[in-house]
Image (spheres, rainbow, N blue to C red):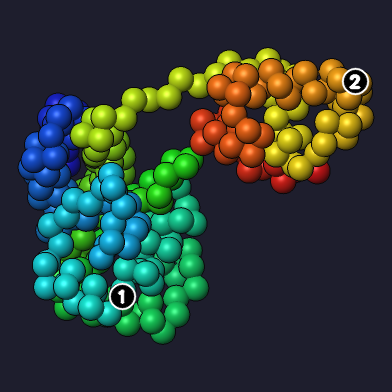
Amino acid sequence: MLKHHDLNALLSPLKEALTIDQLYEAMIRATQVLGFSQFAMGHHVDLQRPPTGAIRLKTYNEDWISHGLDRGYFAEDPIHLASTKTVTGFLWKDLADIIHLTARHKQVLAEAAGFGLGAGFTVPVHLPGEFHGSCSFAARSLDGLNANALPIAQLCGTFAFEAARRIARRALKLQEAIIPNLRPRELEALILVGKGKTDTEIGAIMGVSRTTAHDHVEGARRAYGNARRAYMVVRALFDGQISFADLLRR
């Protein structure tokens, strides 16, 4: 069982990695210490035409990667699908409790086992406005796992993916956007814009005049750099100022 000192020594290189090479070496060590034999971390994108900035770091068997690409398995990966349905890590043996396993899914899993991927644990990654992603640790079986490997794997996957995002953003010279500080009434008006309401409707719902409603909307637009209304709503979703639940709630 990993002690507190050992845990810090395992996580620190993942949290502090400055280059992909450093992160790769830290992940290899974490994978081995936990008792797994392979790992794969990345965004769920078309692996044959990955978009700029997409994360992909792995030690999966290269023959399996080629095998899966030839058959288009990345588009029907049951692990990827299951990771969109939960925010907590899950064992592959529990997939049927998370998604409906089709014949194609079962085929992918059966063939993966032949490449040393018979069992595993996956940590989902969800961020507004970004591709879904995950970090998976795998082995032929889970018989050799450390006694407390799974909760630590959850931590390792989370810290490693965030480090990969940081490294990728730095390489692309992307700066973190400053989130505007909206007034309560501006935020309320923005949500109503996202619901498709006109200024007149927004005023009626908020109990103010059409002119005042328009001013609240314009205040939110100015905070977002005079963005058009549709783009303002997208930005607010991406920033986490509002949620899909806000827009769908009656």
Up the image or down, 31 lies above or below 91; here it is above
Give me the disc on residue 72: 1
Q: Position of residue 226 (x, y in %)?
A: 60, 24
Please identify, in this view, whether the residue under mark 2 or under mark 1 is nearer the observer. 2
Q: Quadrant of the C terminus?
A: top right
Q: Residue at x 31, y 52 (%)?
A: 51
Give the mark nearest the N terminus, 2 or 1: 1
Q: Position of residue 124 (x, y in %)?
A: 38, 50
The amino acid type, in three-letter code, at marker 2 is: Val
In the image, is 203 to the left or to the right of 173? right
Q: Residue at x 58, y 16 (%)?
A: 181
Up the image or down, 87 lies above or below 243; here it is below
Nearest to the observer: residue 97 or residue 61:
61
In the image, is 155 to the left or to the right of 217? left
Q: Position of residue 209 (x, y in %)?
A: 91, 21
Nearest to the observer: residue 177 or residue 150:
177
Up the image or down, 28 lies above or below 9; here it is below
Give me the disc on residue 121: none
The amino acid type, in three-letter code, at marker 1 is: Gly
The Cα–Cα distance between marks 2 and 1, rounded to whole angstroms, is 55 Å
Q: Which residue is mark 2?
A: 208
Q: Residue at x 16, y 73 (%)?
A: 66
Q: Position of residue 42 (x, y in %)?
A: 28, 51
Give the class, few, some or many, for how many residues have Cα within 10 Å of label 2's Cα (few <14, many ≥20): some
Q: Quadrant of the N terminus?
A: top left
